[in-house]
Image: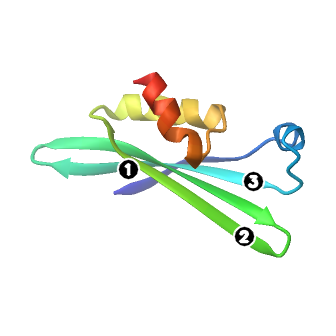
Amino acid sequence: MKTFFDGVFISKEHLEEEGIPYPIKLEYYKTSEEENVETKYGIEVVKTEYLEGNVKVETKEVKHVTNNLEEEEKILTLLRNNEVTPIGVEDVLQELL
């Protein structure tokens, strides 16, 4: 199952520092799978780039991050607050876990 957690637009300051002239939106989702009697929680990060005349979407899902719903929400909050993109999510999770 997939549930929307939160979304943010990357700040103009960060985009300008990287020389990116177009907006980028990040969305964070809670995912879960039932295995026997246990629920395994994961995350999905979606990055949408609004290029001139075009939209580019990149997605990364990481399954079985935790067995604890509260921990999943803390991780998603950290990812959102630090504007973590799909390409960096696995590295960040390795550091956290």
Question: Can you tell which of label 3 and label 1 is closer to the viewer?
Answer: 3
Q: In this picture, is 93 found above or below 37?
A: above
For mark 3, what is the residue? 24
Helix, strand or loop at mark 1? strand
Q: Position of residue 86 (x, y in %)?
A: 56, 48
Crowd around label 1: few <14 · some 14–19 · many ≥20 (10 Å): many
Q: Is the C terminus in the top left, top right, bottom left or bottom right quadrant?
A: top left
Q: Name the residue at 30% across, 31% down.
A: 68
Label tally: 3
**Tag 3–tag 1 contact (CB < 8 Å):** no
Helix, strand or loop at mark 3? strand
For mark 2, what is the residue? 55
Q: Quadrant of residue 55?
A: bottom right
| Residues at marks 3 and 1, CA–CA distance in whole angstroms | 22 Å
The structure's colour scheme is: rainbow
Kindly identify the amino acid type of the residue bearing the numbered disc 3. Answer: Ile
The residue closer to the viewer here, 33 or 70, is 33
Q: Is the N terminus in the top left, top right, bottom left or bottom right quadrant?
A: bottom left
Crowd around label 3: few <14 · some 14–19 · many ≥20 (10 Å): many
Q: Position of residue 82 (x, y in %)?
A: 65, 32
On residue 31, the disc is 1
Q: In this picture, is 66 found above or below 37?
A: above
Kindly identify the amino acid type of the residue bearing the numbered disc 2. Answer: Val
The residue closer to the viewer here, 7 or 14, is 14
Q: Quadrant of residue 84?
A: top right
